Amino acid sequence: MKDPLPPAKQRTTPEEDELASMRKKLRGALPALAQPELRRDLWPDMLRRMEQPAVHVVWRVPWFDWALLAVAGAVLVFFPALIPALLYHL
Amino acid sequence: MDLLQRFAAGDMDAFESLFRQYQRDVYRWIVRVVRETAVAEDLTVEAFWRAHKAHARLRPDGNFAAWLRRIATNLAIDHLRKRREYAGLPEELAAEQKLDSAEQQEMRVALRKAFAELPPRLRVVAQLGLLEEQSHAEIAEALGISPGAVKLRMFRAVRLLRKQLERWEKHP
């Protein structure tokens, strides 16, 4: 169900005016797709996809996260008095 | 045993029936978000593949279409996240727009670039709400958020786009 459009004379908020104005600009810049309907049956593709072996996902942690962890670890090792303070704030 | 119960139990014939019944709806939804037909076809297959893998988690009395749409939306957002650069317009649409003045064309290109650079979770809401005119409730259900959050994201997207356009107007 679509949101009803406000009648022309109804008062609108500045945010709604801005939304309407941007909608108009976007429609000019990004026209509707000419062929949005599915043109073929995808079941054969589905069967091919199901025959592919499962891919094992390898979780990669960014280097920045490792650096952050190392810094946090070092701080706790050199300043153990911070541990109760941290626990208190958690 | 009805179709959803059979699917939840891992029956392949039930899965095929559901696939044939819903493939068009899922494709239409995805193509609205990603705006590329070939990509939308691949993502449709991937969405059903994920649904098939998770069949045991489906409640047979639940809303299968909504569940599938949420999977499809998450996949589309992942795709937007991976491909965040401006890809240009299809040739036929670009030819139509050659009739506009040079300034209008430049403004449109700037807007398309700004749109492509929006954070994916804002872009998907702007795409569905502003361009495709889907209701807030429908978008909220597909994203698993409240209609209020949809409205908020739409305003944030518009604000970011306006800022980018203002920047372009100052330094075209």
Image: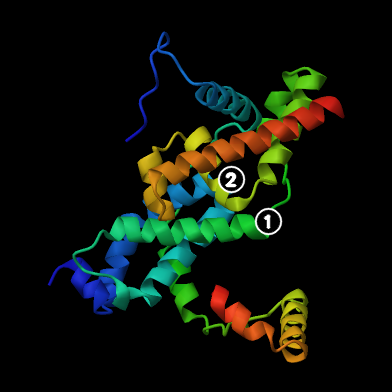
Nearer-the-camera pick, A85 or B28: A85
Q: Position of residue A85 (x, y in %)?
A: 62, 79
Q: Is residue B12 left or right of residue A87?
A: left
Q: Nearer the viewer, mark 1 or mark 2?
A: 2
Q: Position of residue B10 (x, y in %)?
A: 28, 79
Q: Give the mark, 1 or 2, whose residue is nearer the N terminus.
A: 1
Marks 1/2: CA–CA distance: 12 Å
Which of the numbered marks, if any, corresponds to residue B123? 2
Q: Which residue is mark 1?
A: B83
Q: Position of residue B77 (x, y in %)?
A: 55, 56
Nearer-the-camera pick, B62 or B90: B62
Task: Provide the chain ID for the residue under circle 2.
Answer: B
Q: Is the residue marked by circle 2 packed among few (<14), some (14-19), or many (20+) residues within 10 Å?
A: many
> Residue shown at 26%/75% (left/top)?
B8
**Observer able to see residue B126:** yes
With respect to residue B144, does A76 lie above or below? Answer: below
Q: Position of residue B125 (x, y in %)?
A: 51, 44
Question: Looking at the rendering, which quadrant does residue B107 occupy?
Answer: top right
Q: Which residue, as the protein is rendered here, is positioned at the far left? A: B1
Question: Looking at the rendering, which quadrant does residue B50 occupy?
Answer: bottom left
